[in-house]
């Protein structure tokens, strides 16, 4: 079914999405399970060296540097560097806080590239495969293209195109990154739906004229982590999986 043939089910309370032609997706958290993957990669290396950590806590501490690191670039205090480099720098902070010492530069580099070896959530490949039948599906990520491509090749995520921060040399939620999608896809913002599990991401996409889909990922920060879903009706579509999103959009 093409994007122009969407049948809107009124019970979902959605606005008219009949002109929708493309879906842009957040990657980390929405498409891939970064917490479990980083915990696994960290345990594989550090555990093998005799370290015994709370691996989920370590993954979350590493991730906590994400927005501060990007803000240095967004603010102009630092020139743009790719996310692979930020992951490597963020790792040093987490290692120091958990008292992990003695790693070689090569070991740190390998562990930092663990962010390229993350697995998609179980619904992602099947849901995205269906969505591709009716829409262009594009990564719109703070990750650099090489990072997202390596991750996707490993796990079979079937993107039509990867739009990374490389194109605009800054990070979300700066408007330039959202604006790059309609420009590069040659579409109007209203013909694109931003799909993310982070309210800040869908909110900022909406400010640039995108349609919005919120996908719940209650275990993004680990099993049993606190989770607060947005109120029903906050976004054009609110679902629990990419498969459900495909069903709602008629793909």
Image (tube, rainbow, N blue to C red):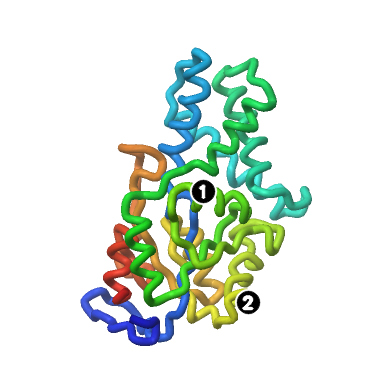
Residue 103 against residue 146 in the figure, above or below: above
State the residue in front, 227 or 164: 164
Label 2, secondary structure: give it. helix
Characterize the local packing of mark 2: few (<14), some (14-19) or many (20 or more) Cα atoms within 10 angstroms. Answer: few
Q: What x and y, as percent, mark residue 125?
A: 37, 57
Kindly identify the residue that appears in the image at 46 percent across and 68 percent down.
Answer: 137
Residue 20 against residue 112 in the figure, above or below: below
Quadrant (top left, top right, bottom left, bottom right) of the N terminus: bottom left
Sequence order check, earlier mark of 2 and 1: 1
Mark 2 sits on what residue?
183
Mark 1 sits on what residue?
151
Gap between marks 2 and 1 measured at Cα: 25 Å
Label 1, secondary structure: give it. helix
Residue 20 against residue 157 in the figure, above or below: below
Kindly identify the residue that appears in the image at 45 percent across and 61 percent down.
Answer: 158
Residue 3 lies left or right of residue 183; in this view the side is left
State the residue in front, 156 or 223: 156
């Amino acid at each position: 079914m093409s994007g122009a043939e969407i049948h809107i089910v009124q019970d979902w309370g959605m606005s008219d999405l009949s002109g929708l032609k493309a879906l842009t997706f957040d990657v980390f958290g929405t498409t891939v399970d970064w917490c479990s993957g980083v915990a696994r990669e960290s345990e594989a290396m550090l555990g093998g060296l005799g370290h015994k950590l709370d691996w989920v806590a370590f993954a979350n501490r590493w991730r906590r540097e994400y927005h501060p690191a990007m803000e240095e670039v967004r603010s102009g205090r630092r020139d743009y560097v790719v996310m692979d480099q930020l992951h490597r720098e963020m790792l040093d902070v987490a290692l120091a806080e958990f008292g992990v010492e003695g790693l070689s530069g090569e070991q740190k580099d390998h562990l930092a590239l663990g962010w390229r070896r993350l697995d998609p959530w179980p619904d992602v490949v099947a849901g995205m495969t269906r969505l591709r039948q009716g829409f262009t599906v594009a990564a719109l990520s703070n990750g650099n293209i090489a990072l997202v491509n390596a991750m996707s090749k490993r796990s079979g995520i079937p993107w039509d195109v990867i739009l990374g921060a490389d194109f605009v040399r800054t990070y979300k939620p700066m408007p330039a990154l959202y604006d790059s999608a309609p420009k590069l896809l040659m579409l109007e913002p209203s013909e694109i739906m931003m799909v993310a599990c982070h309210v800040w991401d869908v909110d900022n996409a909406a400010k640039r004229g995108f349609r919005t889909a919120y996908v719940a990922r209650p275990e993004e920060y680990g099993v049993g982590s606190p989770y607060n879903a947005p109120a029903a009706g906050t976004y054009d579509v609110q679902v629990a999986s990419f498969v459900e999103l495909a069903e709602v959009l008629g793909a």
